[in-house]
Amino acid sequence: MIPRIRFNEFNGDWVLIKLDSLLEFKNGINASKEQYGTGVKFINVLDILNNDYLTNDRIIGRVDVAPEIIEKNKVSYGDILFQRSSETREDIGSACVYLDKEHSATFGGFVIRGKKIGDYNPVFFNKLLKTDLSRNEMKSKSGGSTRYNIGQDILSSIELPFPSIDEQSKIATFLTSIDGKLNHLKKKKTLLEKYKKGMMQKIFTQEVRFRDEDKEFEKWIEIKLNKISKIYDGTHMTPTYV
């Protein structure tokens, strides 16, 4: 397989690789409700769905389990987390990479951990798993009618195209730089929205006003809504009190 768009320095074929050559799969922890809220960071389905990638500080939940269980279910840098069960086919098999080199975590029963056993760039792999190619594979092989599931055996059998490690790293760096620019624009948008909201409050309370040069401010007047619009209460005519 050769992609249509490519960096000039690369020309080798992309090779189809089964996921079980790169990952060792395991289902997560099922603890009692009393064990949640304290302990080690605990990855659940929402963490996978709400993040492009995971680090320890992005994980919301905690679980208090024995050290040997933590060790058996440890999530480390480069591991991939998959959503095992979903009410919709769209979300089944959704994946998120763990990119924290300093802190490990653990994971829940509705999640499958893919422990890194092969050679791949974790950022590239994470992006690949979010493409239509990968998502369609996951959805087409999932089972269920009212609730959809995907198991370790199905994940193991899925094949995806991989370039050389050098090309993976080049692609990962390129896409990460785009993510950085997008995040900058999102922060700028948030600040502008906050500024707009504040200005609207000041304008409509007349704390801030606009006027033409050498002219006085015009007075605002109160107008009943029924003077400028027709208002209906369901299928009824305009109430008299509006």
Image (spheres, rainbow, N blue to C red):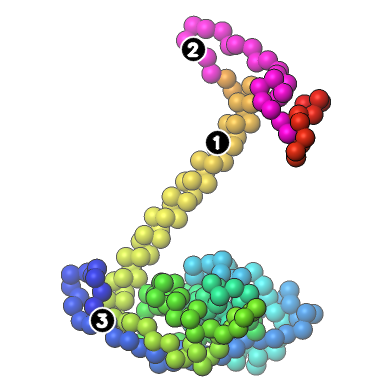
Instruction: Tell me where residue 129 appears, x and y as whole percent.
Output: 43, 76
Q: Earlier in the sequence, mark 2 or mark 3?
A: 3
Real-space Cα separation, disc 3 to disc 1, in angstroms:
49 Å
The relative height of residue 30 versus residue 196 in the rendered view (above or below) is below
Report if residue 212 lies within the magenta region: yes
Q: Tell us which disc is closer to us: 2 or 3.
A: 3
The residue depicted at 75 percent of the width and 40 percent of the height is: 234
Instruction: Tell me where residue 20 appears, x and y as whole percent.
Output: 44, 92
Q: Give the class, few, some or many, for how many residues have Cα within 10 Å of label 1's Cα (few <14, many ≥20).
A: few
Q: Which of 13 and 239 is in front in this view?
A: 239
Task: Find residue 151 and name its label.
Answer: none
Label 3: element kind:
loop
Q: Nearer the viewer, residue 1 or 241?
A: 241
The relative height of residue 131 versus residue 116 in the rendered view (above or below) is above
Task: Give the residue at mark 2.
Answer: 212
Residue 63 horizontal side relative to residue 210, left or right: right
Instruction: Tell me where residue 200 appears, x and y as whole percent.
Output: 60, 31
Task: Find residue 1 and name its label.
Answer: 3
The residue depicted at 65 percent of the width and 91 percent of the height is: 69
Amino acid type at circle 2 is Asp
Q: Can residue 76 be seen in this view?
A: no
The residue depicted at 49 percent of the width and 12 percent of the height is: 212
Task: Give the residue at mark 1.
Answer: 196
Q: Can residue 218 be seen in this view?
A: yes
Real-space Cα separation, disc 2 to disc 1, in angstroms:
22 Å
Amino acid type at circle 1 is Lys
Label 1: element kind:
helix
Location of residue 241 by image quarter: top right
Q: Tell us which disc is closer to us: 3 or 1.
A: 3
Q: What span is colored magenta in the figure?
A: 210-232
